[in-house]
Image (spheres, helix red, strand yellow):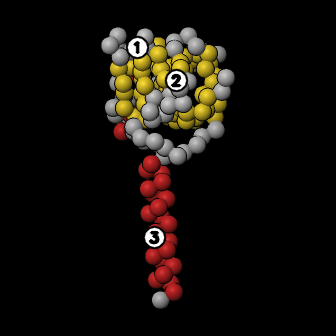
Amino acid sequence: MLSRLRSFGLLGMLAAATLLVGCSSPAPVSLTSGTGKTIAVSGQPSSTAEEALFTGTAVWGDGGCMYAEADDGATFLIVFPHGTTLDEGDTVRLPDGYVIAAGHEIKLGGGFHAGSTDDEDLAKVPAACITEEVFWASGETAE
């Protein structure tokens, strides 16, 4: 009897872990402005907190998408946190009110993940926007 309870407990923990892993990177959607500029935004809130800090410049790049450009010239698609909007004038407004426009120096918290046009998590983002590495912003900003 005790071993069955342990088995059920273990199965319950495995199921919970599977759900947490499945929710750790909610599939992003894309928002496109009237001028054809596009941002990728997490499809749902996430409680995952990654601790990488990206420092660089916000730029419009391939496919009209917003990228983070590092000092060495490398560019990464940014997946903004859930609740981010694309305002008139093609400015990005994070849920905390922080505004980003092309050319702005940015410092965003988050994490880097591999990107691929075959990645189901990125299926709703235009293929022209996807970079080899994608920066998933957590919403934390540094000024």
Residue at 50% from the left image edge and 84% from the top image edge: 3
Quick one: 137 or 97, which is closer to the camera? 97
Tag 1 and tag 2, C-beta contact below 8 Å: no
The disc at residue 88 is 1
Quick one: 129 or 95, which is closer to the camera? 95
Q: Is residue 30 above or below residue 17?
A: above
Q: Is residue 106 above or below residue 124?
A: above
Question: Which quadrant would residue 110 be assigned to in this image?
Answer: top right
Residue at 45% from the left image edge and 57% from the top image edge: 18
Q: Is residue 41 visible?
A: yes
Amino acid at pointer 3: Leu
Residue 88 in the figure: left or right of residue 67: left
Residue at 43% from the left image edge and 25% from the top image edge: 85
Q: Is residue 65 visible?
A: no
Neighbor class of circle 1 (other Cα within 10 Å; few <14, some 14-19, many 20+) is: few
Q: Earlier in the sequence, mark 3 or mark 2?
A: 3
Image location of residue 87, percent across then percent down: 42, 18
Q: Where does label 3 land, which residue? A: 11
Image location of residue 36, percent across then percent down: 34, 13
Residue at 32% from the left image edge and 13% from the top image edge: 34
Q: CA distance from mark 3 to mark 2?
A: 38 Å
Neighbor class of circle 3 (other Cα within 10 Å; few <14, some 14-19, many 20+) is: few
Neighbor class of circle 2 (other Cα within 10 Å; few <14, some 14-19, many 20+) is: many
